[in-house]
Image (cartoon, rainbow, N blue to C red):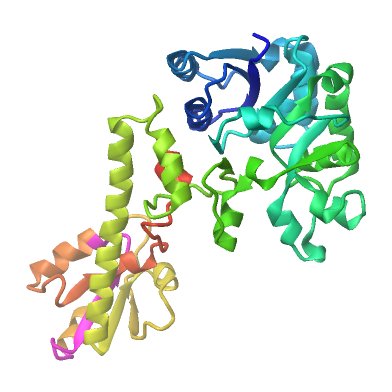
Amino acid sequence: MNNTIHVCYALNDISGNYTKFIGTSLCSLFENTSNHVAVHILHDDTLTDENRNRLVNMTKQYGQEVFFYNILLYPAMVNFIDKMNRIYMSRYQGMFYRLGVGIMLPSNLDRIIYLDADVIVHMDIAKLWNVPLGEANIAGVSDSFIAMLPSELAPILIKNGVVAQNEYFNSGVLIMNMKYFRERPQIVDDMIDFLLGHENCREYPDQDFLNYSFNKSCLHLPMEFNFLVNYARLKNISREEAIFHYAGGAIKLDASDHFSALFWHYLYKTPWQNEITVLNSLAELGKVCRELSEKTAVLKLLLERPRRIFFGSRALCSNLDSSLEGTFYDSGEDETNNLELGDILDIMESMPADERITVVVSHHYEVLKKFFTGMGLKEGNDFVNGHVLTLPEQSMTDFSDSAIIGRY
């Protein structure tokens, strides 16, 4: 079809939790366009049959097409990845697959839209597709975060004057001139040479390389085509329609947050959303609720009792807030359940019960609980579980994608 829009994603899914992001992004794209879309997915052997079938079935439901390209079937790409694995972490190699579009994709394509997996296309993708490239070989949006950095914190390419700070583009949404990439399959080798010659460009290697290579031939697009969610939150700005980019762990569980609600709206429409997902999400929330409740109860009791005895692991007690004052007694615990109660009971008996509280900060709390209750002491009155005070702080409205959707 001459009016087909061609979109490309790259996939390396070692954990098995990454494909659902592409599925969610595709769902948003399909929901917001009436155009025919052909999806091209560059992947390796980490794409499972189950996830592949989910992508195929979902695409068919929307009347669209999806094509898969295993990079391991292309000798030039195998050679490239083999070299790349020697100088860069293999679990992130998927970011480099887009450089092989000229090697793997059909020769009749004039252009392709490349999208990172963590984008929600909450607009008609045709608006981006119809942007004329002119003489440009690539098109992208200036990185909002990079543009606001103090000069001393800017990427080395900016410090060295290779790229102007307000022209350093984000690589998560691109229009790629396929003629250029087909005629230059050696661009994958250029990537290797770039990394070997620029050791300071290892944090965002693909993005630095693209800026280095196309700083003179990039068409700069409006912000709506790569709207960085964390930047928008920082600046308190929003848009009704845009391609929203959730880079930097921007996906959270917060119904009051427009951006988070939008992501979950589309995820719930995909084959990856099911009753197991809901149960796991609720289990995560329930765990945090319990921890917050337990911490609150313990802190409330500590405020009421001026004479505090901290009993347990010396290492765990070192993690307590420095404002929590009291007398520490070492339980002498080790990797087993060996505990040394010493004279702790005598110390407790020497203080009025309504003034003292024993805070048990131990991995073996349940063992100690049985001992103390056997002596007639009451949990929540004579002693409390102080271990909860050493747990990392979490907020129910500040869940990251790894906590909620990265575990199923």
Looking at the image, which residue is at 32% across and 56% down? 288
In this rendering, is residue 376 above or below 303?
Answer: above
In this rendering, is residue 121 above or below 395?
Answer: above
Q: Residue furthest left?
A: 376
Q: Can residue 99 be seen in this view?
A: yes
Quarter of the image that includes the N terminus? top right
Q: Is residue 340 visible?
A: no
In this rendering, is residue 367 above or below 61?
Answer: below
Does the stretch in magenta take in 358?
yes
Left or right of residue 368: residue 266: right
Between 343 and 180, the residue placed more toward the observer is 180
x, y percent for residue 117: 58, 33
Looking at the image, which residue is at 15% across and 62% down? 370
Looking at the image, which residue is at 41% across and 40% down? 264
Looking at the image, which residue is at 43% across and 54% down? 257
x, y percent for residue 20: 48, 30
Magenta stretch bounds: 350-365
Between 237 and 230, the residue placed more toward the observer is 237
Quadrant location of residue 87?
Answer: top right
Number of marks in the image?
Answer: 0
x, y percent for residue 18: 52, 32
x, y percent for residue 7: 64, 23
Does the stretch in magenta take in 268?
no
Left or right of residue 180: residue 121: left
Quadrant location of residue 204?
Answer: top right
Quarter of the image that includes the C terminus? top left
